[in-house]
Image: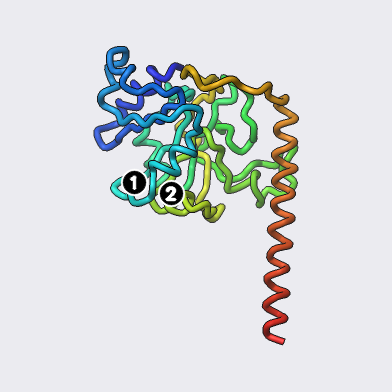
Amino acid sequence: MTIDQMTNEMMQFSDSFDVVLFHYDGRTTEWDEEFEWSKKVTHVSARKQTKWWFAKRFLHPSVVTPYDYVFVWDEDLGIDNFTAEPYLDVVRRHGLEISQPGLDATKGPAPMYDITVRRNGSEMHKTDAGGEHCWDVHKRPCSGFVEVMAPVFSRDAWRCVWHMIQDPEEQIGVVDMQYVVHRAVPTLQGEGDKEKPGGRFEVRARQFEELEAFNSRFANADKEVANRSSSTLN
């Protein structure tokens, strides 16, 4: 799906949605004559930046206060099977503060994490059934986990995430009733020369190594705080 197709479909969500496009190719007004929707959306452009770089600078919690939900999505999602209003109905019904649509595992590259795969016959789910990398289904990325390509935040959750504060895992889930395809194909031009990436499994292994290192440092920090508190009391 091209950025033109995706944006066209997003423009059909409803009048209560506003669309902001973050351009990493340096283009903005050049699209006005090519795409009918271009003048109806907000464009923000900076070459060779990521969506999180843009989000941190242009989606301040105070700016998005009028909105109930913030979709921070990649430009390469296939949304033929996605409709925003039914999706948000599921989110509200289950009290999800952070969510994502389930990924269609039959199309596009294999999903990185089993928890994000859409489950047939399910409205939503919050945990992995226990896959190869889920040593504890009550810990991330086996529960309370969504990926970065298509997250949806409530207004309150975005305020927390914007300040890099995690939300409780019971308020994070994957919506199966509405799902998308992650094609992993950049569609804009001029994003710069890419370094040769590592293999899929090497990247995934590195992610888990870094997660284990983070958890270890976090646990050690808790112990240090407890020891300091104990010393102060003594």
Q: Earlier in the sequence, mark 2 or mark 1?
A: 1
- In percent of width and height, residue 186 lies at 52, 20
Cβ atoms under marks 2 and 1 closer than 8 Å:
yes
Q: What residue is at 70 percent from the left and 42 percent from the top?
A: 130
Q: Quadrant of residue 116?
A: top right
Q: Is residue 148 visible from the viewing direction of this image? A: yes
Residue at label 1?
64
Alpha carbons under labels 2 and 1: distance apart:
9 Å
Say which amino acid is labelled 2: Trp
Q: Does 174 sit left or right of 135 as displayed?
A: left
- In percent of width and height, residue 7 lies at 36, 23
- In percent of width and height, residue 115 lies at 61, 38
Q: Secondary structure at mark 2?
A: helix
Residue at label 2?
158
Category of crowding for the residue at label 1, using alpha-carbon neighbours closer than 10 angstroms: few (below 14), some (14–19), many (at least 20): some
Asked if 80 appears above or below 91 in the picture, the reply is: above
Q: Secondary structure at mark 1?
A: loop
- In percent of width and height, residue 109 lies at 61, 22
Q: What residue is at 40 percent from the left and 53 percent from the top?
A: 156
